[in-house]
Image (cartoon, grey):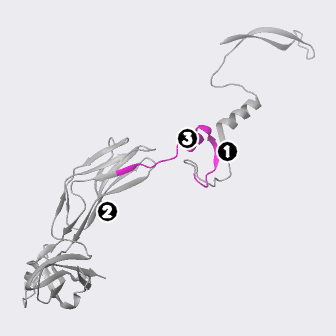
């Protein structure tokens, strides 16, 4: 509080309206930090340098500002933050000891632990999640704001084709994801030899060498002693178009194709295309079966 001498005009003692005289009195004026009196020019300068208004839509992105944005009384501090600190989404990766693989149908793959590694960027992390295909397995929301490494320990038993993913969501909210492992379930290929004239049934096929692989060209080596090379695979893959030896010669005309019902490890009966070559004698005779 401060004292000021203030000169005022006051009516005379007679109360007449046309006679005034100056009088000086002591007055106290309270100074406030909340309300300050400034000139119109100063107020305009303040408004123009602390608030931003522009009705013209932005045409190119800058920082967090995107095309189409307009501004009405936007604090300059906010404007600078949007320009200088563009939004960056979080990053995530994942790993597990049981990595991607091709698995025979009827076999269970057990995943006991998965780790998610999350890097916080512009916004705090809200949740970190583990998915088996489209099914949520486990979610974490405590102590995740700054990112880090998060261990999921719920056991997952896999019996069919699926993908394990980890996801992270920040406060914006933006969700990012990463594939941890892919498990592809198939019925296997078989290859080997049989005696000339042997019966080709489910037992004969199951007695051959198993090759758990997805559909695609396969190369096998055969030791033949007046015996027949055999190649068998799920009929759903279609017919072979070639069976080439290492010299590029097509041996397909020397094979006879039959279809056999084979009992899979999962207990189901599956139709198999079985190709049996005419008897031959050769050592480490490589043949590549090719699909269309």
- The residue tagged 3 is 81
Residue 56 visible in this rendered orientation of the protein = yes
Marks 3 and 2, Cα distance to the nearest angstrom?
A: 37 Å
Residue 47, x across and y down, in percent: 69, 36
Give yes or no for contact between labels 3 and 2 (Cβ–Cβ under 8 Å): no
| 74 is within the stretch colored magenta | yes
* Mark sitting earlier along the chain (1/2): 1
Kindly give the residue lying farthest to the right in the view shown.
Answer: 18
**Horizontal placement of 102 versus 64: left or right?**
left
Out of 73 and 185, give the one closest to the viewer.
185
Residue 39 picture quarter: top right
* Mark sitting earlier along the chain (3/2): 3
Give yes or no for contact between labels 1 and 2 (Cβ–Cβ under 8 Å): no
Asked if 202 appears above or below 146 in the picture, the reply is below
Marks 3 and 1, Cα distance to the nearest angstrom?
A: 16 Å
Q: Which residues are magenta?
A: 66-92
- The residue tagged 1 is 53
Per the rendering, the mark at residue 134 is 2
Out of 57 and 9, give the one closest to the viewer.
57
- At 29% from the left edge and 46% from the top edge, which residue is drawn? 150
Out of 7 and 119, give the one closest to the viewer.
119
């Amino acid at each position: 509080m401060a004292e000021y001498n203030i000169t005022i005009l006051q009516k005379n003692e007679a109360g007449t309206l046309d006679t005034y005289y100056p009088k000086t009195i002591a007055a106290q004026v309270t100074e406030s930090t909340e309300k300050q009196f400034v000139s119109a020019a100063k107020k305009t300068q303040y408004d123009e340098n602390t608030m931003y208004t522009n009705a013209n839509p932005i045409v190119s992105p800058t920082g967090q500002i995107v095309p189409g944005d307009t501004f009405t009384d936007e604090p300059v501090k906010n404007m600078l933050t949007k320009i200088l600190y563009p939004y960056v989404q979080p990053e995530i990766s994942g790993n597990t000891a049981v990595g991607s693989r091709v698995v025979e149908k009827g076999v269970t793959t057990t995943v006991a632990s998965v780790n998610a590694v999350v890097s916080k960027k512009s916004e705090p992390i809200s949740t970190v999640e583990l998915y088996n295909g489209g099914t949520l397995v486990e979610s974490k929301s405590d102590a995740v704001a700054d990112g880090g490494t998060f261990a999921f320990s719920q056991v997952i038993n896999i019996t069919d084709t699926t993908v394990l993913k980890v996801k992270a969501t920040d406060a914006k909210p933006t969700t990012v994801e990463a594939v941890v492992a892919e498990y592809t379930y198939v019925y296997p290929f078989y290859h080997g030899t049989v005696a000339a004239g042997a019966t080709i049934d489910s037992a004969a096929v199951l007695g051959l060498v198993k090759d758990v692989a997805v559909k695609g060209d396969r190369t096998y080596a055969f030791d033949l002693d007046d015996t027949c090379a055999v190649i068998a695979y799920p009929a759903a893959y279609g017919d072979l178009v070639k069976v080439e030896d290492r010299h590029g010669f097509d041996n397909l005309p020397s094979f006879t194709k039959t279809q056999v019902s084979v009992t899979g490890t999962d207990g189901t009966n599956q139709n198999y295309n079985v190709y049996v070559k005419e008897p031959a004698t050769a050592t480490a005779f490589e043949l590549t079966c090719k699909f269309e």
